Image: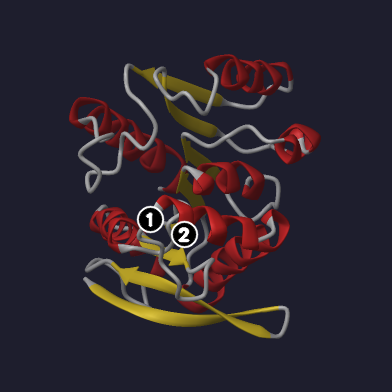
């Protein structure tokens, strides 16, 4: 695989992202990439964990990019992460995410793009699903914020969500309510709840990582991508 930090345009300005090209990809046969995926960071930023997940996605044969929503800053502590999170506006972050999808299509010939994100990135994944740039969305433990509730009618793509029943920051009831709204609108969706806490997919955090839940979720992600990106 080839990985590098790239720049792409958004409203006349440059944004950066971590791009990984799978071995199967070639410009002459872009379809060999089997689609593309935008991977959206947790609140700590574009750290080694998010880069590792981006590489894992590329290993499946998809062109993958993780937008740098913090412009190079990476938090080491929760207080620092909270500060960085508060400094970004969700709508502007969604624009960067959508521009990353356009970059994959325009510069790498990818016709179908999915988005997948974690924590803050899970919320942004759901918000990005309203933009028309994606064919599928995979949020991991994304909070169901008011902006999502206001944009429910704009969600048209399949949604695959993963949550922990022991995640004290995200009530199960709020996710079940979101699922019910999608069902009522005829939006294809699956939501899976594990006996785990927040950030159960992050294997760099021993205090929250749940191997069984993580492996099961990854198998479901692979099936979802295969169904909607190939």
Q: Residue at x 48, y 31 (%)?
A: 160
Q: How far across and down, in percent of the image, does residue 103 sit? A: 55, 73
Residue 93, relative to residue 228: is it above or below?
below
As drawn, is 93 to the left or to the right of 228?
A: right
Note whether residue 39 is visible.
no
As drawn, is 171 to the left or to the right of 27?
A: right
Circle on res. 209: none
Residue 218, relative to residue 24: is it above or below?
above
From mark 1 to mark 2, how far is it between C-alphas?
5 Å
Q: Residue at x 29, y 56 (%)?
A: 49
* In-front residue for pair 228/41: 41
Rendered image coloring scheme: secondary structure
As drawn, is 168 to the left or to the right of 128?
A: left
Where's the N terminus, which quadrant? Answer: bottom left
Note whether residue 195 is visible.
yes
Q: Residues within 10 Å of mark 2 (few under 14, many from 20)?
A: some
Circle on res. 77: 1
As drawn, is 228 to the left or to the right of 177?
A: left
User: Which residue bears the numbered disc 2?
Assistant: 80
What SS does tag 2 mark? helix
Dots 1, 2 in contact, CB < 8 A: yes
Q: Quadrant of residue 174?
A: top right
Residue 82, relative to residue 216: is it above or below?
below
Q: Residue at x 47, y 53 (%)?
A: 79
Q: How far across and down, in percent of the image, does residue 127 sit? A: 66, 45
Q: Quadrant of residue 227?
A: top left
* In-front residue for pair 147/226: 147
């Amino acid at each position: 695989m080839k990985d590098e930090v790239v720049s792409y345009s958004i409203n006349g300005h440059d944004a950066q992202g971590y791009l990984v090209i799978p071995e199967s990809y070639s410009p002459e046969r872009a379809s060999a990439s089997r689609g593309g995926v935008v991977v959206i960071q947790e609140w700590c930023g574009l750290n080694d964990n998010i880069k590792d997940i981006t590489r894992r996605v590329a290993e499946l044969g998809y062109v993958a990019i993780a937008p740098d929503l913090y412009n190079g800053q990476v938090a080491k502590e929760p207080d620092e992460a909270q500060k960085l999170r508060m400094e970004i506006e969700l709508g502007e972050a969604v624009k960067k995410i959508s521009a990353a999808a356009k970059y994959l299509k325009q510069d790498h010939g990818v016709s179908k793009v999915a988005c997948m994100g974690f924590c803050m990135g899970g919320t942004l994944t759901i918000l990005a699903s309203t933009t028309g740039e994606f064919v599928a969305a995979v949020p991991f433990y994304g909070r169901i914020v008011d902006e999502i509730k206001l944009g429910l009618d704009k969600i048209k793509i399949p949604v695959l969500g993963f949550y922990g029943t022991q995640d004290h920051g995200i009530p199960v009831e709020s996710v079940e309510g979101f699922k019910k709204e999608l069902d009522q609108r005829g939006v294809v969706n699956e939501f899976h709840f594990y006996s785990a806490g927040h950030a159960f997919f992050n294997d760099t955090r021993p205090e929250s990582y749940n191997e069984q839940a993580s492996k099961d979720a990854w198998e479901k992600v692979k099936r979802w991508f295969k169904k909607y990106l190939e």
